[in-house]
Amino acid sequence: MKGIPKSEWSELQSLPVQTNLRLKPPTVSQVNPVSVVLDTMLKEDIGAIVVVDESQPVGIITEKDVLVRVVQPQKDFELTLAKDVMSKLFLVM
């Protein structure tokens, strides 16, 4: 837990999940370039972000997605869109 002394970990771990939930998590549009996706992730201090199309979730982008699908193949961060990097959401029943 970044920035929190180890002596306070057990107290934080005993809190209900709702304490740390975001009711409206940060999102990006599927047509945003990866540069905007990364700027948002850095600003919000998160490792994954929900991708939306007209306010509906359509996918998720993780740090690893960016590494594997953009950095490794040396794609342009300004020209590569979120929809080309995201993992599509799926429903498990």
Image (spheres, grey):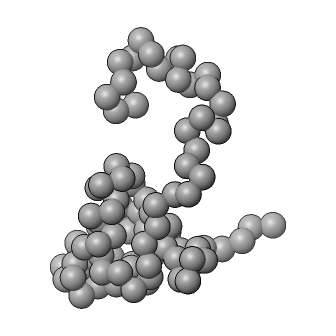
For the residue pair 76 and 35, the one nearer the viewer reads as 35
The picture places residue 74, in percent across and down from the top left corner, at 18, 79
The picture places residue 23, in percent across and down from the top left corner, at 60, 52
Say how many tags the image has: 0
The picture places residue 83, in percent across and down from the top left corner, at 43, 83
Residue occupying image coordinates x 53% and y 23%: 12
Name the quadrant containing residue 29: bottom left
Name above or below for residue 6 compared with residue 19: above
User: Split into 4 quadrants, where in the image is the C terminus?
Assistant: bottom right
Q: Residue furthest top?
A: 7
For the residue pair 27 and 85, the one nearer the viewer reads as 27
Q: Is residue 44 left or right of residue 11?
A: left
Residue occupying image coordinates x 61% and y 22%: 14
Name the quadrant containing residue 6: top left
Residue 9 visible here: yes
Residue 87 visible here: no
